[in-house]
Amino acid sequence: MLFKLLSDGPRTFRALLAASVLVGLQWLGDAVVAWWGWPVPGALVGLLLLLGALFAAGGVPQALDDVSTPLLRHLMRLLIPSVAAVGLYAGLLSQHTAAFLLVAVVVTAPTLVVTAWTLQRLIRRSSR
């Protein structure tokens, strides 16, 4: 029903609703993590909830695409504080280089595999 609302109505209403959905899912992810005490970021749980909702809807509503495209276009600006933190904690990172590299590889490799698999499925689906 919510995704139906993202398809109907004035454009401003749809954009505000889409932005509210994104913020609401992040909040819900934070709430789930806090409630269950999981050692994962709440934003990750919110993204997984969004992924499940998009699978259930069968695609990305246009309003959600319109709201998320500028955010993704400027994603690197959102990561600047993380890059600055790496510079701030360079000494600590150099002490734990092996562990840091191991974790980076263990996390990056499955992410690349899942992303490639998802992209292949989306390309096959769009070519049908």
Image (cartoon, rainbow, N blue to C red):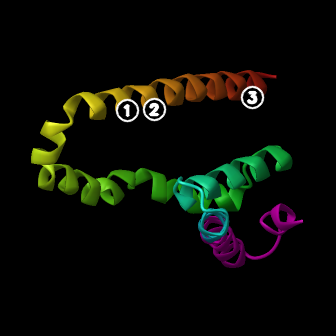
Which residue is at a point 13% across and 37% down the rendered structure image? 94
Q: Label 1 sits on what residue type? A: Val
Chief SS of the magenta region: helix
Residue 70: give its label.
Answer: none
Q: Label 2 sits on what residue type? A: Val
Which residue is at a point 65% across and 28% down the rendered structure image? 118
Residue placed under numbered mark 3 in the picture:
126
**Is 42 included in the stretch rendered in magenta?**
no
Q: Say if mark 1 contacts mark 2, CB within 8 Å.
A: yes
| Image position, residue 46 (x, y; %) | 63, 58
**Is 4 included in the stretch rendered in magenta?**
yes
Q: Secondary structure at mark 3?
A: helix
| Image position, residue 78 (x, y; %) | 35, 59
Q: Compare marks 3 and 2 and give the one earlier in the sequence.
A: 2
- Residue 16's place in the image compared with 120, above or below, is below
- Residue 16's place in the image compared with 58, above or below, is below
| Image position, residue 114 (x, y; %) | 60, 27
Magenta part of the chain: 1-26
Residue placed under numbered mark 2 in the picture:
107
Which of the pair 9/118 is nearer the observer? 118
Q: Is residue 52 left or right of residue 28?
A: right
Residues under labels 1 and 2: Cα distance? Answer: 6 Å
